[in-house]
Image (tube, rainbow, N blue to C red):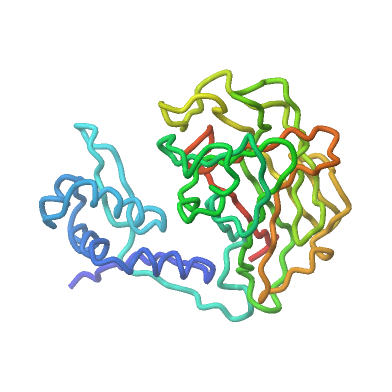
Amino acid sequence: MNEIKQDTIRYPSSRIVDVAKALSGDVRVRILEALGEKPMSVSQLAEALGVAQPTISINVQILESVELVSSTTGANREKICSVTGRSILLELPVKLGEGLHRTEELHMPIGMYAHCMTQPTCGIVTKDGSYVGSVDDPRAFYLPERVDASLLWFSGAGYFEYYFANPMPPGVMIDELWFSAELCSEAPHFHMDWPSDISLFINDQLVGTFTSPGDLGDRKGKLTADKWSGTEYGQLTEWRITASGSLVNGNASSTVTIASLDLQYNKPIRVRLEVAEDAANCRGLNLFGANFGDHRQDLLLSFIRYSE
């Protein structure tokens, strides 16, 4: 009797959560069952499992993300799926932080600020270009519908402050902290030459200031609602805090270091985007969410460790 070879996929401890999530859905387990004997197309899987084809596609993508399923293109340009192994081996963590990724990311919708200060011109719109509350009314920024914001703006001085959880367990240190957001200045309608000094504070420490060149509206934003006109897109801007200092878009910006931020596992990390009253270019802020502008991302805070 021939021995049946079992192909084993080995996962490090940092991928346990990802694999567990991928296997936690009934549809995904049924997909693996269906693919057990032979590869199948997405439409064949939908027919065999009695599930809508879009649902199959989404769940196949989740299984692909952890390399439990691989796909090729068939003769009719249809996606052909197959399992990548017969068993998996999960390495359990043996010390603090070993079950984490080298990079842990937190995504924050722009409407979930904890505090703000705004003045007209100001406003909030959702992804379809509809206003939340009334335009140029600072009270709109305290309406519960603000959580659906895809674009926020104020002129002159002001700020938005967010509270991020610290995903690191006690005793686990990080080497760098990165923050990125799509943003630009704020002018009536739009103004390409309208610089504004937009600063990032973390735990009340000035990480660095980015001078936005203008309020950008010379073309349609890649994700911006068709019915919206005016400010269309921003610039994806990145601040980095390292062990030796901070940078904005790769350029040195301050002496603030990871150690000086005093990050603690049981306290929120306070992140504030601000245009100061005494800024040389005090010309407001437009802040874009994942469904507006050019970049499909919300506010992104990344925790970086050089080794897992």
Tell me: residue 61, above or below residue 277: below
Tell me: residue 197, above or below residue 69: above
Residue at image x 25%, y 41%?
79
| For residue 251, side relative to residue 169 (left or right) | right
Q: Out of 137 and 125, give the one closest to the viewer.
A: 137
Q: Position of residue 76 (x, y in %)?
A: 19, 32
Q: Which residue is situated farthest in the top direction here? A: 218
Q: Quadrant of residue 173?
A: bottom right
Residue at image x 72%, y 32%?
212
Residue at image x 57%, y 58%?
106
| For residue 192, side relative to residue 293 (left or right) | right
State which quarter of the image contains the C terminus. Answer: bottom right
Q: Out of 249 and 30, give the one closest to the viewer.
A: 249
Q: Position of residue 232 (x, y in %)?
A: 54, 28
Q: Out of 231 and 239, give the one closest to the viewer.
A: 231
Tell me: residue 138, above or below residue 166: above
Q: Position of residue 167 (x, y in %)?
A: 60, 68
Residue at image x 41%, y 27%?
227
| For residue 158, side relative to residue 10 (left or right) | right
Q: Quadrant of residue 59?
A: bottom left
Q: Which residue is situated farthest in the bottom direction here? A: 94
State which quarter of the image contains the N terminus. Answer: bottom left
Q: Position of residue 281 (x, y in %)?
A: 81, 32
Q: Which residue is situated farthest in the right direction here? A: 255
Tag count in the figure?
0
